[in-house]
Image (tube, grey):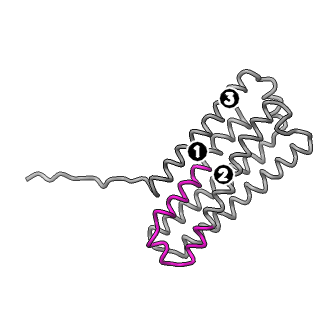
């Protein structure tokens, strides 16, 4: 008698709709990244000069803040899967609080560059820099709003049991925002 072992089917966390949205967002950002890299390869002096005016420490702080925020959120989702609504809610709020480090740091960096006279119309480097990082910044703010709404929903302990898919969808969006920054940081600040 032979038994066939079946492995459990793995499913994407969250709803299919969020994954379609994430794919669309990744496509848009891929176009920005390709445009940035292409312009950099055709204007290396301009882009090298522009990169020297950036604040790589602020970029590193932003990276650490977003990675930490995503990690905390992943722990919150694990707590949700265990039915621990309190730990899940705390994780969502802590993830948002850590993300504020990114917001403050990025606003400081924009302020420093604008004070030095750089803006979207300075040259192609700054146009790409402000547009791409600004578009990402808007995604961070939207992600924080989504996480805050979900954290408020978690005031009802039954929400964890009834709507894990929505929590996973919000977390998946947030992880996409983090992933985009992990690509954006080296592309803009380092390479």
Q: Is residue 90 above or below residue 104?
A: below
Q: Residue furthest left?
A: 1
Q: Earlier in the sequence, mark 2 or mark 3?
A: 3
Residue 53 place in picture, x, y as percent: 84, 37
Q: Is residue 10 left or right of residue 131?
A: left
The residue where tag 1 is placed is 25
Is most of the magenta stretch helix, strand or loop?
helix
The residue where tag 3 is placed is 37
Closer-to-camera residue (190/168): 168
Q: Residues within 10 Å of mark 2 (few under 14, many from 20)?
A: some
Residue 19 place in picture, x, y as percent: 49, 50
Residue 185 place in picture, x, y as percent: 69, 41
Asked if the residues shown at circle 1 and circle 3 are in contact, with their CB atoms under 8 angstroms apart, the answer is no
Which residues make up the magenta segment?
149-177
Residue at image location 79% in from the left, 28% down from the top: 48
Quadrant in which residue 130 is drawn: top right
Residue at image location 72% in from the left, 26% down from the top: 39
Q: Is residue 102 above or below residue 83?
A: above
Q: CA distance from mark 2 to mark 1?
A: 10 Å
Residue at image location 45% in from the left, 73% down from the top: 83
The residue where tag 2 is placed is 139
* 1 vs 3, front mark: 1
Q: CA distance from mark 2 to mark 3?
A: 21 Å
Q: Earlier in the sequence, mark 2 or mark 1?
A: 1
Closer-to-camera residue (84/103): 103
**Magenta stretch: includes residue 154:** yes
Question: Which numbered marker is on residue 138?
Answer: none
Q: Is residue 74 above or below residue 118?
A: below
Residue 64 place in picture, x, y as percent: 68, 52
Asked if the residues shown at circle 2 and circle 1 are in contact, with their CB atoms under 8 angstroms apart, the answer is yes
């Amino acid at each position: 008698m032979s038994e066939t072992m079946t492995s459990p089917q793995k499913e994407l966390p969250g709803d299919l709709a969020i994954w379609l949205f994430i794919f669309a967002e990744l496509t848009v950002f891929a176009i920005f990244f390709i445009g940035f890299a292409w312009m950099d390869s055709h204007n290396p002096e301009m882009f090298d000069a522009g990169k020297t005016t950036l604040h790589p420490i602020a970029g590193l702080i932003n990276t650490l803040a977003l990675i930490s925020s995503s990690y905390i959120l992943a722990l919150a989702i694990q707590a949700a899967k265990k039915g621990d609504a309190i730990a899940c809610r705390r994780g969502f709020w802590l993830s948002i609080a850590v993300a504020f480090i990114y917001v403050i740091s990025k606003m400081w960096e924009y302020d420093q560059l604008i004070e030095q006279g750089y803006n979207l119309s300075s040259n192609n480097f700054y146009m790409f820099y402000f547009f791409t990082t600004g578009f990402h910044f808007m995604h961070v703010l939207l992600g924080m709003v989504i996480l805050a709404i979900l954290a408020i929903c978690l005031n009802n302990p039954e929400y964890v049991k009834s709507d894990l898919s929505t929590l996973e969808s919000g977390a998946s969006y947030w992880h996409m925002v983090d992933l985009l920054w992990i690509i954006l940081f080296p592309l803009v600040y380092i390479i």
